[in-house]
Image: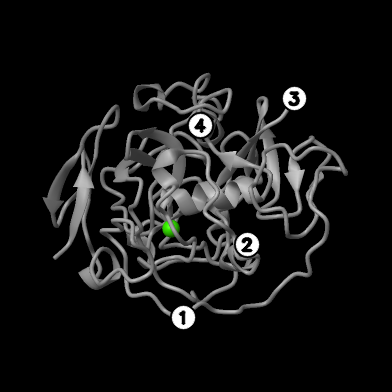
Amino acid sequence: MSIRRACGVAVSSALVACGLTVAHVESDPEPVSSRDGGPSTDVPAPDSEGGASGDGGSGTGVDGGVSGVDGGTPIVDSGVTDGPPITKDANGCPSGRGPAMVKVGSVCIDTTAVTVAQYTVFLERNPSNATSVPQCESDATHQPGVWPQSGADKPVVWVDWCDADAFCRWAGKQLCGNATGGVLREDEWKSPDANPWYAACSNFGERAFPYGNSHDSTACNVNTNGASLADVHAFPSCRGGAHPSLAQMLGNVHEHVNACSGNDCIAAGSSFKSRSTPPPDCSFVLDVSRTSRFDDMGIRCCAYVQ
Ligand SMILES: [Ca+2]
């Protein structure tokens, strides 16, 4: 049984994005067990979409250093100080944990989704559930619903909003929200002034897709192109938006963003399961809950720097 929240209503075998983007309906091309089914075993929180949980993997590690941004105050208090050093890149964006960033307007944004290898480094620090929002206080673990995951350079998936929030903070970053880092309202989604994620994807509203205004069904990893999770550097023709290094703003995985009302959230971008007709463009959002975990939803962080 495949059930996924859509506009606050459970819909069977259908996936509907709503809000400002209407009429985007995704099919469920894969066996349902890979998406929503299976027992949830890793957390007491109501992770309704959890999959079978495996034992924590050890993975390859990166020896930790002293946390801090250029020896100063971290840009965002991660709650977890242990890990590789956080420095600033040439644009003043945090560097050292998670993907490299680019600057879009005044906001830094990850060039790729967070990879399995990058998330493994985070998990190896035994992150606490320190979090920015009370809704995450009951999120006892940041181990994904399915773990370990294969493919070091594939996006980490099966992560809920609280995991994504915690990872970004550990990296000296935060989930992409509104222009000043606060909670983005869903009705602000298509405003490039209010929504840095949309500005990055659409080159400040100038184009519908990262690569241009005309839909190319082969450019990004949507379900006409194999329907499986791809490395974050795959599909080079999908790059673009406000910066040529931005990869897969559409396709491959939906991305957690800081746009929740209570426990009702939206996720950005389309995924490898998204149908190409009608083509999901940068205005596409998916309605999820704060505890949703899917095999096609991952993490991309932002950072708000002076
Ligand atoms: Ca969790």
Q: Is residue 31 visible?
A: no
**Tag nearer the camera, 2 or 4:** 2
Is the C-beta separation of discs 3 and 4 under 8 Å?
no
Residue at which label 3 appears: 306
- Amino acid on which disc 4 is placed: Gly
- Judging depth in this view, the residue of 206 and 193 nearest the camera is 193
**Measured from the top left, where is residue 22 in percent x and y?**
23, 32
Of mark 3 and mark 2, the one earlier in the sequence is 2
Mark 2, ligand 1, within 8 Å: the answer is no
Look at 58% across and 52% down and name the residue there: 167
Alpha carbon distance from label 3 to label 4: 16 Å
Look at 21% across and 68% down and name the residue there: 32
Of mark 4 and mark 1, the one earlier in the sequence is 1
- Amino acid on which disc 2 is placed: Phe
Residue at which label 1 appears: 55
**Measured from the top left, where is residue 229 in percent x and y?**
44, 66
Numbered label attached to residue 23: none
Q: Please tell me how crowded label 1 is: few (under 14), some (14-19), or many (20+) other residues with Cα within 10 Å.
A: few
